[in-house]
Image: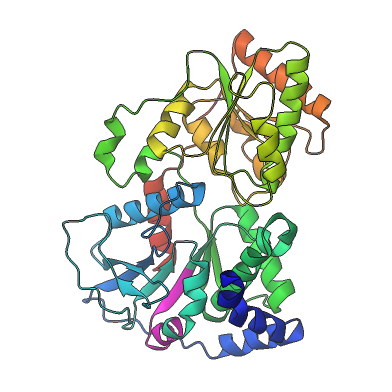
Amino acid sequence: MKAFWRLLPCRIEQAATAGPVRKLRARLQRSRLISRSVRPLTETRRLFIDISVISRHDAGTGIQRVVRALARSLNEENPDQWDICFVAADRRRPYHVITWLDASKIVSPVEMSAKPGDIFLGLDFSLDTIWRYRDQLTRFQRSGGSLWFLIYDLLPVERPEWFSPNNVLRYKAWLDTMVGLAEGFLCISDQTEEDLRRVLTARYGLQDGYRTSVVPMGHDIRESLLDPASAGCDIPVRFNTRSPFFLMVGTLEPRKGHADILAAFSELWRHGAGDRLVLVGRMGWAVEELRDAIRTHPEHGGKLLWFDDVGDLELERIYQACQGVIIASHAEGFGLPLIEALGHDKPVLARDLSIFRIHERLGVHYFPSDGSATQIGACIAQWAEHIQRDGVQVIRPNANWKLSAQVILAVID
């Protein structure tokens, strides 16, 4: 009930600006965007990086590993022409400068405002704060600043049935706000950039007047740690990693495809297969049936293991120990666990989707996108045999988080 009342203004606005009204409003808002004024080259420009969500609570999801890694890399690159400022907002306070990464660095928690040439980078997935403080962001833009946002995927708009109604509502309000203010969008893949342009055309009638660019994603989990020194800590893994196992990484939610893989392994186990399946990921929305199927499975605790509270260091060691990684998502904006696995020289078996096919040259294998449990099980068995018999040649991705930061700085400059 609290969520209903909290989101009621958002719900009313969405209802009032549906269809043609939404398109008209987007064009009107963008027509009011002022041309960016560039401050003299002798002055240092400020880059305000939004970390509203992760600075309050780090849930350890893939998106938050990306936010941490990019924030760290941007801070470390920190060329002379930029003054990096981390900012956050919450229900009580608008965007303000905070201390983050370096606890010894004391900053004044002043409210964020712009001078000509400053940039706001919406790095975090801040659905609520972007919408709640749109007036502040509008003032930022009208004072000569510009706004860029990192886009992870468009799935809550294109496949709302995979998400809770409240999260779909929050996402649409977030996107509506960005569309009215952004100079440009940074996308985590070519697929996301293509999806974004399609949604901006269909939902807002926008075919130009904004910029997009694709940012390469890194894969090294250690580069996303807030304390790099902790990478050398001996974090134990809570199960026996000496016995071979296959791994799935990601929040349990409908689009991730865990149910298909569980059904496929169940088929294999019924026929005597000894392969273990380890699931690493928190429980998401609308997966109560899957949760119960896992916990009551005859192999749970033996050949089937599920851990919903794995930190990054333990995950790093699980990647190192596994035989291979299975990616079963029905759709993704990128698919971070896929390149994290390849970065650990681990074979990958992925659902046959275009977003995953681009990695085929790196040694990724595929199972049919709409395959039955028996078909997927056969693909898993064949892949496992291939790994055990003569190995699978894997090529590490060549992108890293340092390159990601360099691309971002070049694009927004």
| Residue 143 on the magenta span | yes
Q: Quadrant of residue 190?
A: bottom right
State the residue in front, 167 or 178: 167
Please, is residue 379 above or below residue 260 in the view? above
**Side of 9 relative to 255 (left or right):** left
**Side of 391 relative to 202 (left or right):** left
Q: Provide residue 55's location: percent of width, then percent of height.
A: 36, 59
- The residue drawn where x is 45% and y is 51% is 64
**Side of 324 relative to 376 (left or right):** left
> For the magenta stretch, what is the residue range?
137-148
Furthest-front residue in this view: 1
Image quadrant where one finds the N terminus: bottom right
Image quadrant where one finds the C terminus: bottom left
Please, is residue 366 above or below residue 404 in the view? above
- The residue drawn where x is 28% and y is 30% is 233
Q: Provide residue 306's location: percent of width, then percent of height.
A: 57, 31
